[in-house]
Amino acid sequence: MVSSTTREEMNRPITTLFMLMSVDGKISTGASDCLDVDKDFPKIDGVKEGLYQYYEIEQTTDLWSLNSGRVQEKMGVNTAEMPNKTPVSFVIIDNKHLTTNGVKYFCEKSKQFVLITTNANHPAFDVSEDNLHVILQDELSLSDALRLLKQDYNCEGLTIQSGGTLNGLFLREKLIDFIDIVVAPVLIGGKNTSTLIDGKSLQSENELSQLGALKLINCSVLENSYLRLQYEVIR
């Protein structure tokens, strides 16, 4: 674990990438936006039986959660009815996927809702809620955004649950501290299906420093052939 001294010295939250994936590393059931593990895994015999464990573990993660607008659009928040309030504060990185209804959805659901965008015309600017905060950037800077989350909103620990491309940006910028993965007993395949870490591939040996070497903290065998793997990212 990160030492208390290091925690105090860091100018950003301690981050944990928490995801549900298949044995072959896929975080979606296919390359189409109409396919999604949350919607599809409950339909698959041999997978649906143990799925509840992921959601139980999710309830024990940080009280700050980061995701992308694209993932949330797939989840249907733009047309969803308003949810109940939760104790979790949500951070969404989005330029064009959330509508006004999607923004209001997270205002209703969140303790604090922080939207990070480079779009000065984002629908969030038309929503007036006490718990809505918008970080407008000229270009996306994850490090600056994390610094502001800690400095301005007292975010000490942040769970990342975004798509493979955004996860890849966090990895390349050395902004992931821990990995917490629930592995479902299924193979999905497909070279265009999103994986845990997507984004630009490395092209040369000089870029190997961008890899994320891991130290295993814990490996738990769950029920119904599920696994939970917990790692610390080696600096």
Image (spheres, helix red, strand yellow):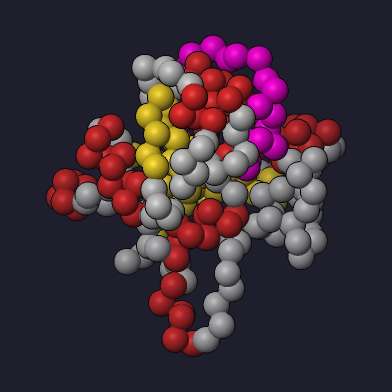
Residue at the bottom extreme, as displayed: 205
Q: Is residue 230 above or below residue 37?
A: below
Q: Is residue 41 above or below residue 10?
A: above
Camera-nearest residue between 93 and 62: 93
Residue 85 located within the stretch drawn in magenta: yes
Residue 16 appearing in the image? yes
Q: Residue at x 54, y 26 (%)?
A: 103
Q: Which residues are magenta?
A: 70-90
Q: Is residue 122 left or right of residue 194?
A: left
Residue 214 appearing in the image? no
Q: Main secondary structure of the magenta part?
A: loop
Q: Residue at x 33, y 46 (%)?
A: 146
Q: Position of residue 70 (x, y in %)?
A: 62, 42
Q: Position of residue 105 (x, y in %)?
A: 56, 21
Which quadrant of the view contains residue 141?
A: bottom left
Residue 87 located within the stretch drawn in magenta: yes
Q: Is residue 183 left or right of residue 35?
A: left
Q: Residue at x 48, y 60 (%)?
A: 169
Q: Position of residue 86 (x, y in %)?
A: 47, 17
Camera-nearest residue between 50 and 34: 34
Which quadrant of the view contains residue 112?
A: top left
Q: Residue at x 52, y 86 (%)?
A: 204
Camera-nearest residue between 233 and 35: 35
Q: Is residue 143 left or right of residue 196?
A: left
In the picture, the quarter occupied by the C terminus is bottom left
Give the total number of marks visible in the rendering. Answer: 0
